[in-house]
Image (tube, rainbow, N blue to C red):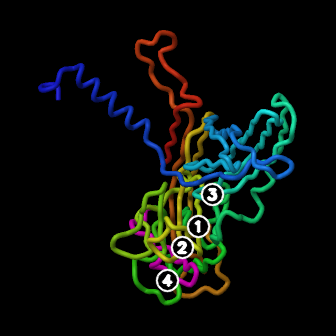
Amino acid sequence: MRRFLPYSIQVLLFLTALSLTLTASAQYRAGLQGSVTDSQGGAVAGATVTLTNNETNRSQQTTSDTDGVYRFSALPPGNYTLSVEQTGFKKQVVNDVAIKAEETQGRNIVLEAGGIQETVTVSDTQSAQLATENANETRAISNAEIQGLPQFGRDPYELLRTTPGIIGDNSRNAAGNAIFLGGQSTGPGGSNTSIFQTENQVQVSANGQRVTSNNYQVDGVSVNSLGWGGAAVITPNQESVKEVRVVSSSYSAEQGRNSGAQVEVVSQNGTNNIHGSAFFKYDQPGLNAVNKFPNSTRDNGRVNRAFRNYGGSVGGPLPLLRFGEGGPWYTSGKDRNFFFFSF
């Protein structure tokens, strides 16, 4: 490259590539919408609605339309703070609004008459109520569940069975390999080699459909196998997953590729606080539980399988260098740029 391009052009190309990398983002499809009304039920038009991500402190604003309706889209999952202001009304602040992955939620706001300098602060109480924005049968598998519930080979897809409308028995044979569900004996089968399985055909059935009808996405991008139906070519590790949304029936328009379970994985993200994890998994036949009904395929009634795995993650604000601006030679990245890495 040095032989053909001046040094200044090389630097320019490098900085351009770096800027394109830093502006890349996941394709989030979660949303928050609702109406702003007064105590009499009348629509409040032109109200300023601000939504702030509590993890990154990033804010976005919109105004209610003539019918008092507001909407935010393309939101990453997490906890948010919602505030609404309008002249002649008290400012209302709603804390701990939980946004679930790839799901549109409703939150109506009722403003009280008063001065705008007065503030009414409430905690969100609608998150656990019946969803009214659509008729989907769905479940959001949280990061706490992914980290805490047992999964064979640390495979997050093993938790799909906890969704209403989905069946799967997680059966294993004597060697510890997955058993096909309901006689469906085509395809590579479920996870046998932890998250390293090239094509993971998870043994679950949604809404009465076959295993081959399931659909998988990671951050809005299809990861379906081109060779086997209902298999994912990427199995994310537990540390890299923030939330998994599973829809088992009554699919929305954007979920039309397959008729089985719609599995939507959202990756973990960096925040203003540095956070991380580390683990070492050690499975040894001598540590496995004893089978009360042993047979010739097991040694001393235990599953004769050893497994070793280790890894971790780290995320936080991403410091950036400053060029010719004076003052500090770098910025901390808080409220602006973030990184997350897992292994």
Q: Is residue 305 visible?
A: yes
Label 2–label 1 contact, CB within 8 A: yes
Circle 4 Cα neighbour tier, 10 Å, few/some/many (<14 / 14–19 / ≥20): some
Identity of the amino acid at label 2? Ala
Q: Which of 277 and 245 is in front in this view?
A: 245
Residue appearing at x 71%, y 39% in the figure: 47
Residue 246, numbered label:
1
Residue at image mark 4 = 210
Identity of the amino acid at label 3? Thr
Sequence-first tag of 2 and 1: 1
Q: Which SS class for mark 4?
A: loop
Residue 104, numbered label:
3
Magenta-colored span: 196-213
Sequence-first tag of 4 and 2: 4
68 relative to 303 in the view: left or right: right
Per the model, the C-alpha gap separating discs 2 and 3 is 18 Å
Per the model, the C-alpha gap separating discs 2 and 1 is 7 Å
Label 4–label 2 contact, CB within 8 A: no
Residue at image mark 2 = 261
